[in-house]
Image (cartoon, grey):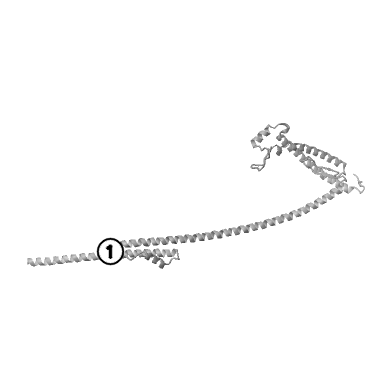
Amino acid sequence: MLENIATILQQQTAQIVSGNQLVIDQTGKITIGNTLTGEQTANIITGNATSDAIKAITRENKSYSEQMLEQLAKSGTTQTSSLADVVTQTSLIVAAVHQLIQLTAEDLAAKEAAAAKAAADKLAAEQKAAADKLAAEQAALLAAQIAQATAAYNAQAATAESYRSQWDQFATSHASPYFTERQENIETGTPYSVTGYYSYSDAERAWLSQTVSAYQSAFAAAYDLWKAIPGHATGLDYVPKDDYLMRAHEGEAVLSPPDAARWRSGKTGSNSNVILIEEIRALRAEIKAGNVAIAKNTGKMAKVLDYVDQEMNTDGLLIRTS
């Protein structure tokens, strides 16, 4: 009985050992299957990544077709059966795709630069056209303004000439045969003078003579003071404003404000510019007041002449007296 049991146990042990060996064999096959599945999965992932990159490039640049990019990606790789080879192939594919992306970026940059240049040229042309149009409009406006000003000047000139002609005719008809007139000139010391002007009224003529004498005296004094003012021959003392452009000649001098102040403060008596200026201003005020008085008396004289013309007969005698 014990021998039978031992025999049965030995048989079962052999079966167990055989079963274990079968399990070991199957485990090895499963491991090999898993390795093959991992390699195939890596190939699938690599293929999917390459396909996605190719599609992205074709979206950015229509000049590359998917067939051309796939052929370029496949040309540098071969079918492998190990994970290391798959990694190597993937690196090659990534390098090829990177090169394609760089070429695409350069092509896009060139196109953008060309578009920017075209836009800049268009903007420059539009600005030039606008500037030319504005210049033409301004030229037309200036021409119109010149024409308008010329027409206004011509109309005023004609009116002024007509008035001057009428006044000359009036003055000639009412003046004495010895009528003469001389304009003043302060540079030569020539005062204004007139003779034979409206010699109808002795009283008015005497008053005008006194006025003219006073004017001539004031003018002579002003002329003497004017001659004493330093000119370019003795140097410039007064400058109208800063940065005044001038050319100094030999013997001339331009004083700075401090030097000019010291020079003026050192001048005394009749040679002082300050005194001269004050006297000139006073004389100008007197002359201005005299001119106002002359204008008033000229109006009075005109009224007297009108009265004489109306009341005097052809023989020069008054028709009536009052």
Question: Between residues 245 and 276, which one lies in front from this camera angle?
Answer: 245
Placement of the C terminus among the 4 image quadrants: top right
Q: Is residue 190 left or right of residue 76?
A: right
Relative to 49, say whether 225 is above or below: above
Taking the image as drawn, is residue 282 in sight?
no
Question: Between residues 79 and 5, which one lies in front from this camera angle?
Answer: 79
Q: Is residue 143 left or right of residue 16?
A: right
Taking the image as drawn, is residue 18 in sight?
yes
In x, y percent, where is residue 106?
A: 45, 60
Q: Residue at x 28, y 64 (%)?
A: 35
Q: How many numbered callouts?
A: 1
Kindly give the residue lying farthest to the right in the view shown.
Answer: 315
Classify residue 81 by image quadrant.
bottom left
Label 1: state its secondary structure: helix
Q: Residue at x 75, y 54 (%)?
A: 154
In x, y percent, where is residue 254?
A: 66, 38
Classify residue 48 by image quadrant.
bottom left
Relative to 270, say whether 43 is above or below: below
Amino acid at circle 1: Thr
Q: Which residue is mark 1?
A: 35
Kindly give the residue lying farthest to the front in the view shown.
Answer: 250
Q: Is residue 116 left or right of residue 172?
A: left
